[in-house]
Image (cartoon, rainbow, N blue to C red):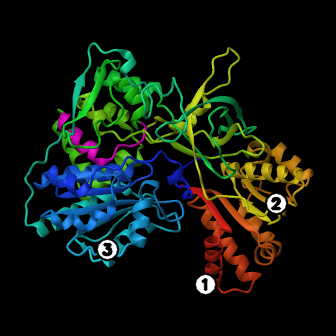
Amino acid sequence: MGCMFSLPQDRLAAAERTPQIRETSFIEKMKKTNRNIVVFYGSQTGTAEEFANRLAKDAQRYGMKGVAADPEEYDLSELSRLKEIPNSMAVFCMATYGEGDPTDNAQEFYDWMQGTDDDLEGVNFAVFGLGNKTYEHFNATGKYTDKRLAELGGKRVFDLGLGDDDINLEEDFISWKEQFWPAVCELFGVEATGEDSSIRQFELVVHNDINMNQVYTGEMGRLKSFQTQKPPFDSKNPFLATVTGNRKLNKGGNRHLMHIELDITDSKIRYDSGDHVAVYPTNDAAVVNGIGERLGVDLDTVISLKNLDEESNKKHPFPCPTTYRTALTHYLDINNMPRTNVLYELAQYASDPQEQENMRKMASASPEGKALYQSWVLDSERNILAILEDLPSLNPPIDHLCELLPRLQARYYSIASSSKVYPTSIHICAVVIEYTTKTERVFKGVATNWLKNKEVTDNGHKLTVPMYVRRSQFRLPFKPSNPIIMIGPGTGIAPFMGFIRERAWQKEQGKEAGETILYFGCRHKNEDFLYQQELEEFERAGVLTQLNVAFSRDQEHKIYVQHLLKKNKEQLWKLIHSNNAHIYVCGDARNMARDVHTAFYEIAEEVGGLTHTQAVDYFKKLMTKGRYSQDVWS
C-alpha cells in the first residue's frame, strides 16, 4: 500500500513545527492536583498516547491518581524531583519510528537523556515500548529509555515491555499491564479498590441553541482555519490543497493504482524529493450513517465532551463543540478494529448476559479471551459498526462511544514529484485498499478510497485535501555525480519518480549526473507497470542509465527485484564498493526490504569475498553514513 506507518525520522521537523507553549513544571502540577503517577508518551500515530491515557485511567482502580503527559510540553530535566512526591512513579510509553528513532514529540526528551548526568536515585520508573519486528531497529527507543533511566540511577519498578505491532500490539500491552500493576501495588503497599466498571473521563454537553459559527466542522486546530487559511501549515494547521490531477495508473487487473496531484500554490510549503505528504482523510459516510441508524441517534446534534478533570491539559477528546456526524466523519477512527479497552468499557451496555460476558472476556488477559479477540475481532476485521451489527443487544450511548474511539490519524505518502520541476505541486502514488473480509463485509481503506473519489471536475467545483509536508532523511546525494541505485517495487516507485525527475533537471542545468539505476517490480508488464511511458522516455533520454523491471507473474516462477539484483551482482558491487553509490529502498518492510537486504549481503559475500558477518557490518556502516536509505512501511 502507498500509505506508511513508519517513516524516516526528521531532525528538521522540530524546528519547523509551531513552537510549543511550555507548561508550568510537571512536578508542581502533580503536587497541585494530587497526582502520584505520570505517564509520558512518545507517539507518532496516536497509539502510545492512547496507551498512556489507559494507564493513567487504570491508576484510579488502584486508589492512585495518574496523568498522561506529552514530553514536548514539559521540562523533563525535572525528573529527578519526582521523589519529592510520595509513592510516585513515571511510566514511559515510547514508540520507535523510522530507522530506530524517537517520535517527533519525544525528540527533546531523547536528546536530554543522551546529554544529562542528573542523578535519578529514588525515581521509580517503568517503560513500555511500541515497535514492529519487521523493522531492523525493533523498539530501539523503548530499549534506550529503559536502559538510560536505570544508568542514571532510576529504580526500575517493572521489566521493560516490548510491544510488537507486527503480531498483536494490543495483546502485548494487556499482558504487560496485567503484571505491571501488581508490581506497582506491591511497591507502594496498596490494593486494588475494586472500581472495575467504567470510569468516564468526559461528560456530555448538548448545545441546543448555539451559533453554528462556533461549531467545528472538521478543522484540526483553529476554528474556521479551513475558511481563512494562514501559514505556516503543519499537523495542527493543514493546508487545503486543490486536487488538480487524478488518474488510474494501471492498465488492467482488479486493483486501482492512482496518481494524484495536489496544488500548493500560495501555501509557502516547500518540499524536497524524498519527503512525505500527510493527508487528513474523512471516513466513509455509509459507515457514519450506519452507526447513527444502529444507535438511533440524530447525528446532527451539536455536542461537547468536556473533561471531568478540570486540571487536565486535554479539555476535549477532539475539537468541540461539534456534531456527532463531524466527530465520526473527521475526528474518530471508526474503520479499524477497536482495541480491547473499548470492548471492556462498552460491555455494560449489552443487555444479553452472554454478549456482555464475551466482550469482557475479550478484554481480559486470559488465553481464551485473547484467542477470542484475535479470531472474532482481528482476524474477522470487525470495525465498530460490524461489532454493533453482530451484537444486537449492545446499545451504548453514542457519547460514550465517541469518548472511547481513538482519533483518526493523518496518512503519510512518499512524494512522487520533484520540487525543482514542480515547485507548486505535490504528487502521490497509491493503491486503493479494498477487499472482502471473513464476515463477507467489504473492507475499504479510509484514505485511499477517499482520495480515489477526489475526481477533477469541469463544473468549477474544486475538491480539496487537507495536507502538510513532513521532512525526511530520504535524500538524493549532495553530489549529483554520485551513482544512485533505487529499488522500489509497486507504489514503492513513488519517491524515485521525484528522484529521476530531479536528475533530469540536474542534467538540464549542465550538472554531471552520476549513473541512475532503477529496479522496479510489478505483477504483469501489460497491467501494472506504473509510469511505464515516462520511465522508458527517461531511459531513452539517458537520464535513467538502467531500467530493470521484475514482472513477478508473467512467467511460471515468480521473479522479484532481489532476483534482478543478484543477476547484476558484479556491476552493483563495483558501484557500491568503488564508486560511492547510494542505495535507496522503498516499499514493503515485511518481505521486500528484508529480501533486498539479504540479496546485498549475498552480493558482498559472492563478489566482494566478505564473510556473512562482515557483509552485515558493511551495510550497517553504509546506513550510518547515509548511503543506504530506506523508506518502508508494513
**Mark closer to the chain start, 1 or 3:** 3
Q: Are marks 1 and 2 in contact (CB under 8 Å)?
A: no
Rounded to the nearest angstrom, the CA distance separating label 2 from label 3 is 49 Å
In front here: 505 or 72? 72
The image's mark for residue 516 is 2
Which residue bears the numbered disc 3? 118
Which mark is nearer the camera, 2 or 3? 3
Which residue bears the numbered disc 1? 613
In front here: 250 or 439? 250
Res. 186 in view = yes
**Residue at 36%, 74% in the rendered image:** 148
Disc 2 secondary structure class = strand
- Relative to 148, residue 106 above or below: above
**Residue at 88%, 61% in the rendered image:** 512
Disc 3 secondary structure class = loop
**Mark closer to the chain start, 1 or 2:** 2
On screen, residue 230 versus residue 358, left or right, reads right
Q: Is residue 92 magenta?
A: no
Q: Could you tell me what secondary structure mostly forms the magenta stretch?
A: helix
Q: Amino acid at mark 3?
A: Asp
Q: Which residues are magenta?
A: 335-350
Image position, residue 110 (x, y; %): 42, 65
Q: Amino acid at mark 1?
A: Thr
**Mark closer to the chain start, 2 or 3:** 3
Rounded to the nearest angstrom, the CA distance separating label 1 from label 3 is 38 Å
Quarter of the view holding residue 297: top left
Quarter of the view holding residue 549: bottom right
Q: Amino acid at mark 2?
A: Thr
